[in-house]
Image (cartoon, grey):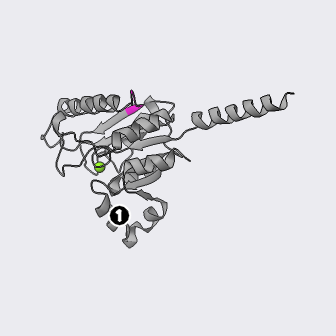
Amino acid sequence: MSEPTILWSSSVESYIKKISNRPVIGLDRDGVINKDLFTYVTKPEEFEPIDGSLEAIANLRKNNFKIVIITNQGGIEKGIMTQENVESVHQRMFELLGKAGCPSIDALYYSVSSRKDDMYAKPNTGMFKRCEKENPHIKFAGGYFVGDKMSDLKAAIKVNAIPVLVRTGYGLETEKELNKFTYKTIKKRTVIFDTLSNFVDWVVLH
Ligand SMILES: [Mg+2]
């Protein structure tokens, strides 16, 4: 009686196929993972997670998604903070993620400016391209990029990821902006959730 065995193994195979093909989830930082202070997060104490966001990232990890954080940190070039300051904030974020059950992510990139002519700053795609070059298992095309600003959605579209807007941080303002005629095409492609946690609940079932 081999039939039950075949059924069992094919379902395991399809499960393995499903989890190894999990898309890349790109995440903006401020206003998505931590509360946007509407200024710069310059020290670890100022990193305040949005309710449920760390647990949501842990849930992505448990479900075998590839996770990359891509964040503009324009305060560096403005002299408001140093790269060391930003890295100490990230250290704090990784500690908190670890406590929430997420021992690792795939990569994190930050830009030192938010200038339009900086190829690395979103909405430009320099950070995404560099990430793909340095991490051959990361392909944003077909994945998702979650953010709270128009620059996040624009960058997502440029790398062929599905733009995800969350209503935290600048999200509500961005949602209003999306209704302008100029953003018609971006709006069509964008999926909107209240929080990162709500997005993750949805995406793990897809
Ligand atoms: Mg943001």
- Toward the left, the furthest residue is 80
Q: Residue at x 32, y 29 (%)?
A: 99
In this rendering, is residue 1 above or below 168?
Answer: above
Q: In this rendering, would 70 be left or right of 132?
A: left
Q: In this rendering, would 172 be left or right of 68?
A: left
Q: Nearer the viewer, residue 13 or 138?
A: 13
In the rendered image, residue 31, in percent from the top left (x then y), is placed at 28, 49
Task: Tell me which amino acid carries mark 1.
Answer: Glu
Q: In this rendering, would 159 be left or right of 88?
A: right
Query: Is residue 40 in view?
Result: yes
Give the image quarter of residue 82. Answer: top left
Q: Nearer the viewer, residue 89 or 79?
A: 89
In the rendered image, residue 206, in percent from the top left (x then y), is placed at 56, 47
Query: Is residue 161 in view?
Result: no
In the rendered image, residue 74, in percent from the top left (x then y), is placed at 22, 44
User: Mark 1 highlights which residue?
Assistant: 175
Q: Which residues are magenta?
A: 103-107
In this rendering, is residue 110 above or below 166?
Answer: above
Q: Nearer the viewer, residue 189 or 95?
A: 95
- Toward the right, the furthest residue is 1
